[in-house]
Amino acid sequence: MSSLTVPSSSHVLNTHDHLMAMSSYLGLPSLSPDFHWLCNGCGHILIYMPESLPNAISTTLPPTSSDNGNPHKSSPNVPLPTCPVAVSLSAIIHIDCDDFWLTSDGGYQGPGTVWRDILDVKPSCTVANPGIEPVMSDFMHMLHNLHLLTKHCVTPGFSSGKSFFCTDHQAIARFKLHHKLFEAVDTDTDSDQPNEAPTAPFTFEHWPLTKEKNHTELLALKHSHHLLPVPGYDMAGFLIAPSAYQCCLQGAIAEVHFTLSH
């Protein structure tokens, strides 16, 4: 995510021109047919897989309750990879000042009805039309394409969920993004590929919290999970510190890259 809190017209235009050349840009008038939903564990991820891609194998989805035990392919005649990776979709958006919880801990107050524990926390924000051309005209394409993508991943017997899309008090369409704050340590992979240790302010010890009383709960995850900072960068290309998420990102025009899963 690149923050353009005070964007110049030339910067927006250059970013827009760059994204327009990418099939993953949601502002394109028509959606690529090479996006497919793929079963991944207990859910699905959206992948990008051209049918012409060589050296891939066909993978099938497990039977659903309505298919009488006959497995369905996620997409007919589409080769799928053995190790699928969710495709990164791109957009230029305005991060709304309302419903902004993209802070270091999503406003976590402690275990309760919103979050069962700190491990459940997923900082989030609502995004809307950036209101400046040429990306303003692309936003309706973004919404349309997202509606198409989410519509194509509905469990038989159920309707499409509405939590991803929302409207404000003026009925202006928006959609929501959230960030995965923790990732479980993979002992096999992490032992083979040691990562550079994070430095302040991106460590468990220095991570800012809404309530300091929750620091013990956070530190308890240090050896079992990685702490994942929001991949937000300022205009100079520097990673934004967690204590500055709100002042840098709330209300900003931003280039975002995100994946879809359910």
Image (cartoon, grey):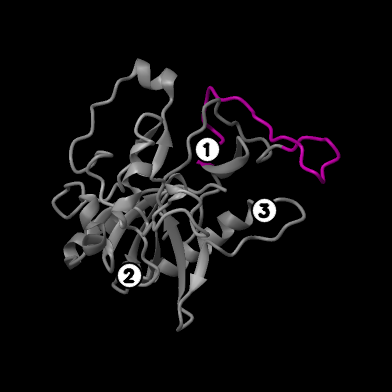
Label 3 close to label 2 by CB (< 8 Å): no
Instruction: Give the residue furthest to the bottom.
Output: 170
Residue at x-position 31% and y-position 57%: 210
The picture places residue 179, in percent across and down from the top left corner, at: 40, 50
Label 3 packing within 10 angstroms: few (<14), some (14-19), many (20+) = few
Q: Which residue is mark 1?
A: 50
Between marks 3 and 1, how big is the CA–CA gap? 22 Å
Quarter holding residue 224: top left
Seen in the picture, residue 69 relative to 211 is either above or below; the reply is above
Q: Which residue is mark 3?
A: 154
Q: Who's the residue at 35% across and 69% down the image?
A: 96
Task: Determine which residue is flagged by label 2.
Answer: 130
In this picture, residue 142 sits left or right of residue 41: left
Q: Residue furthest right?
A: 68
Q: Amino acid at mark 1?
A: Pro
Question: What stretch of residues is rendered in magenta?
Answer: 47-72
Mark-to-mark CA distance, 3 and 2? 29 Å
Circle 1 — which element? loop
User: Of 182 and 230, which appears nearest the observer?
Assistant: 182
The answer to whether residue 231 is visible is yes
Q: In the rendered image, which quarter is residue 178 located in?
A: bottom left
Residue that lies at the very extreme toward the top in this rendered image: 192
Would residue 50 be counted in the magenta stretch?
Answer: yes
Q: Nearer the viewer, mark 1 or mark 2?
A: 2
The three-letter code of the residue at mark 3 reads Val
Query: The residue under label 2 is which amino acid type?
Result: Pro
